[in-house]
Amino acid sequence: MRRRVAENLTAYGFLSAALVCFAVFSWYPIARGAVLGFQQADFVTDPAWVGWENFERLFADPLFATAWRNTLLFTALALVFGFVVPFLLAVVLNELRHLKAYFRLVVYLPVMLPPVVAALIWKWMYDPGPGLLNTALRGLGLEGAAWLDSADTSMLSLVIVSTWANLGTATLIYLAALQGIPGDLYEAAELDGANVLRRLWHVTVPQTRFVLLVLLLLQVVATMQVFTEPYVMTGGGPEDSTVTVLLLLYRYAFYYNDFGTASALSLLLLLVLGAFTALYLRVTRKADA
Amino acid sequence: MRTLIAPGRHRAGYYVALAVTTVVLTAVFVVPLVWVALSAMKPAVELARVPPTVLPRTWTPGTYAEAWDLMDLGRYFLNTIVVAVGVWAVQLAVDVPAAYALSRLKPVLGKGILGMMLLTLMMPAAVLLVPTYLTIADLGLLNNPLALWLLGAANAFTVFLLKRFFDQLPVEVLEAARIDGAGQLTLLWRIVLPLSRPILAVVSIFAVVAAWKDFIWPLLVFSDPARQTLSVALQRFAPDTPVNLLLAGLVLSSVPMIGLFLVFQRHVLAGLTAGSVKG
């Protein structure tokens, strides 16, 4: 009995620093965020309860709908590129038996760059005049684009940067999953007369279904919180075409010092992302069982 | 091993695919970086030329030194190192004993505590931006790297990875040391840590890389320009710095991470799959 108490004391001694850090920087902020959404809070006066006023202010802001539309567009485009491309790339890389180490190194290189550096490099490459991108396009006999300078292409441009910078992670995770597929499955499928595309669809995809689904969900949650690229590259322009939910949240909090409305927006974001997180939990739980 | 396409078949096709992949991946991922590093050595006038020159017509490698001085990069490097090393040290000092306690000492409520920690992983980072910022402000930690160190220590993923590793350590070794009269602290320091080198390497690299790449938290915490990290300072300088100097600054600030990757490539990539899926 006494031994058990002593062991618990030691254990909590070991845990104490972590408990304080989590309490102050995770658990307390979670509760505080929920409360703040219904308060009027700036740095100057004491916070006061305002009911749903913060939410009403958000709904009345024309940028609110714009920000959600832009964020959904970013997420959708990011999935088209950031989900499909790494998978196909991993499938190709898995077939190649030469230069394996080089390919791995190369796709992961941009992941090591600080996102601000990647954003600033691309901002310069997007320059419609001497920029590398339009130069390359003109070299191929194509017409260059206005990229960040036009509301039509600005969001697409941000998606390209974010895909370029992050694709290495997904590619290498898929590659690891592909290597776990037993070779006889392909063998058997081939004997049954399945061609390459059918083997890809009936063997590769089902065998990696779990990893694909998990990365898909994580990617949705991550891309809906996009901030660095629009903040650094466009500031939300041109014509508000790249104002994302997080950029709007940042403006409310740190331009207008309206922490209540910013928190209300956080809660709405949590509601949306919570759905995906719950799905993610279900998927991973099922796999554990 | 057998993959989608049987090896040895379609010889020519294979080499075409290999060549195309090599060219495309190099063009997409390597050329831009080389292009930036080369362009930084062109004078500003040459950089504005359409179409651009491939190799610098006039080599000005001195731009790198000039950028270093003009933007006072030494200061921002130091600030970033202070943040990254601090995050690493504090995260290990806080999370290793915690994970060890949860894994081996199994205290009352231990499962509940782990659950509460893992719950924070499900919380999108953006949702906690405002309340965490206000908490940091209340504690008087704005413009203090300590804010980022402590924030980094509340990392459930690190606790989870460490705990899972400690769970798999052979019981016999620990029991033997216990019988020899070693206290838990000695046990952790002398026996467990040396056995845990692989996971400590993974966690350390994660911590340093994440801290170096982080943008939004340093942006919020360091309003004082003299304390900012490289990322925050570079985006502040970007609008009114001559392009060649800015490019040189971007290259210089990426060198440590690229170097780290080249040296510890095996660990970085192992960590990617060791954490199974969560990046």
Image (cartoon, rainbow, N blue to C red):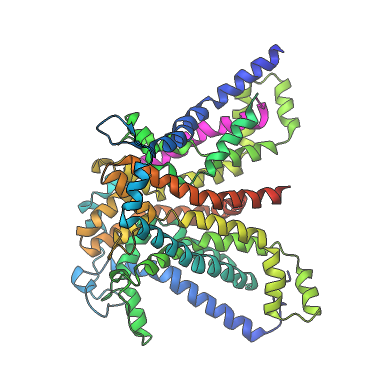
Relative horizontal placement of residue A175, taking residue A120 as reference (left or right): right
Q: Nearer the viewer, residue B267 or B235?
A: B235
Figure check: A122 above or below B73: below
- Magenta: main secondary structure equals helix
Q: Nearer the viewer, residue A226 or B74?
A: A226
Q: Is residue B211 visible?
A: no
Q: Residue furthest bottom?
A: A141
Relative horizontal placement of residue A218, taking residue B30 as reference (left or right): right
Q: Nearer the viewer, residue B150 or B31?
A: B150
Q: Residue furthest top?
A: A2
**At 39% from the left edge and 69% from the top edge, which residue is drawn?**
A156
Quarter of the view holding residue A101:
bottom right
B266 in the magenta segment: no
Where residue A167 appears, x then y in whole percent?
50, 63
Q: Is residue A105 visible?
A: yes
Where residue B191 appears, x then y in whole percent?
65, 31
Where residue B3 appears, x then y in whole percent?
70, 71
Q: How many marks?
A: 0
**At 63% from the left edge and 37% from the top edge, which residue is drawn?**
B163
**At 29% from the left edge and 71% from the top edge, which residue is drawn?**
A150
Where residue B259 appears, x then y in whole percent?
44, 55
* Magenta region, residue range: B82-107
**At 33% from the left edge and 30% from the top edge, which residue is drawn?**
B138
Quarter of the view holding residue B245:
bottom left
Relative horizontal placement of residue B198, taking residue A72 as reference (left or right): right
Quadrant containing the N terminus of chain A in the rendered view: top right
